[in-house]
């Protein structure tokens, strides 16, 4: 009897650790799907025009975007897979709000390769787009994409935007997600940094009516250097505020002191407007 009971314990233990055939099969299928998806993606990359250019239709407009890092970069992979603008639903929400038109100058802070800048200029017909992108590699692609879409009035700046004009540095970098690169002010940094308030008298910024801010958590630095500009122009603001970082509270408090209220258009995206 003791021998049987001991044998039963061994058998139960073996049953517990034995792999589930369905789980193993599911894992293999997931792996096959990932491999197939990657193979299809590489085929899409190979079919890009010379200059890594993707062409697609957005309404009645023909759009061309250069995607030199589409093989690895998250944002460019999404554009190539969908053959459409990145964050198309959020862009459509902004379009529906009627905040940008032919008399509005737009600042795109954290412009990356120009996905949003092209939408603001080509689809929404903004008077002028001022695009700020500190990464030299992304900046060169940004300039190319503005050119490809005939946005001759757009201006691109290879710098970060912060609380003062000076210098900054990279604090986080992921080559597979260039848009997730983070920056911070640093006196000994090598990256040029500008405060928007220092541009308030510039001819290019007159008519400012909309600012998009996607700066990986540094929005308070950007806003700290733009208080005079916000009071003078009262532009609408589209700000990415990461929910897991509890970024909304401090940002909305600061903007409320300047007369702004907000509406949420996505899990991490908010539109702030002020009474004019």
Image (cartoon, rainbow, N blue to C red):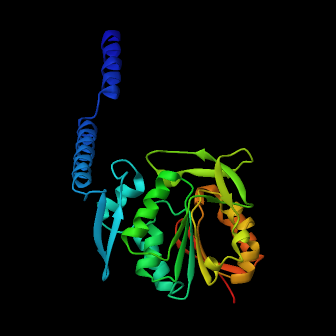
Q: In this view, does 226 lie to the left or right of 146?
A: right
Q: Dividing the image into 4 quarters, which one contains the N terminus?
A: top left
Residue at (29% x, 30% y) in the render: 19
- Against 151, residue 25 (above or below) is above
The image quadrant of residue 4 is: top left
Q: Dividing the image into 4 quarters, which one contains the C terminus?
A: bottom right
Q: Where is residue 66 in the image (x, y as percent from the top left)?
A: 35, 60
Residue at (73% x, 71% y) in the render: 197
Residue at (26% x, 36% y) in the render: 24
Residue 272 appears in view: no
Q: Position of residue 111 (x, y in %)?
A: 52, 63
Residue 233 appears in view: yes
Residue in front for this viewpoint, 152 or 267:
152
- Tell me how many marks there are: 0
The image quadrant of residue 160 is: bottom right
Residue at the top extreme of this rendering = 3
- Against 127, residue 227 (above or below) is above
Q: Where is residue 68 in the image (x, y as percent from the top left)?
A: 36, 53
Residue in front for this viewpoint, 160 or 224:
160
Q: Position of residue 228 (x, y in %)?
A: 76, 75
Residue in front for this viewpoint, 124 or 203:
203
- Against 235, residue 5 (above or below) is above
Residue in front for this viewpoint, 163 or 4:
163
């Amino acid at each position: 009897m003791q021998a049987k009971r001991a044998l039963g314990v061994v058998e139960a233990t073996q049953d517990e650790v034995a792999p589930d055939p369905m789980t193993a099969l599911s894992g293999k299928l997931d792996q096959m799907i990932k491999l197939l998806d990657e193979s299809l993606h590489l085929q899409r990359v190979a079919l890009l025009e010379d200059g890594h250019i993707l062409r697609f239709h957005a309404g009645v407009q023909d759009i061309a975007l250069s995607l030199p890092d589409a093989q690895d970069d998250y944002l460019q992979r999404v554009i190539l897979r969908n053959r459409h603008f990145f964050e198309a639903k959020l862009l459509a929400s902004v379009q529906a709000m009627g905040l940008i038109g032919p008399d509005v100058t737009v600042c795109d802070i954290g412009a990356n390769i120009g996905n949003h800048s092209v939408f603001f200029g080509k689809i929404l017909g903004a008077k002028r787009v001022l695009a700020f992108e500190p990464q030299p590699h992304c900046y060169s692609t940004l300039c190319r994409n503005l050119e490809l879409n005939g946005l001759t009035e757009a201006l691109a700046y290879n710098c970060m935007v912060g609380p003062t004009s000076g210098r900054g540095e990279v604090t986080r970098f992921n080559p597979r997600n260039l848009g997730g690169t983070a920056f911070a002010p640093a006196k000994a940094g090598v990256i040029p940094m500008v405060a928007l308030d220092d541009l308030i008298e510039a001819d290019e910024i007159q008519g400012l009516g909309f600012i998009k801010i996607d700066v990986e958590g540094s929005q308070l630095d950007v806003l700290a250097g733009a208080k005079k500009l916000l009071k003078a122009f009262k532009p609408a603001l589209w700000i990415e505020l990461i929910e897991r970082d509890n970024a909304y509270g401090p940002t909305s408090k600061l903007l409320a002191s300047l007369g702004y209220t907000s509406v949420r258009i996505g899990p991490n995206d908010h539109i702030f407007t002020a009474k004019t």
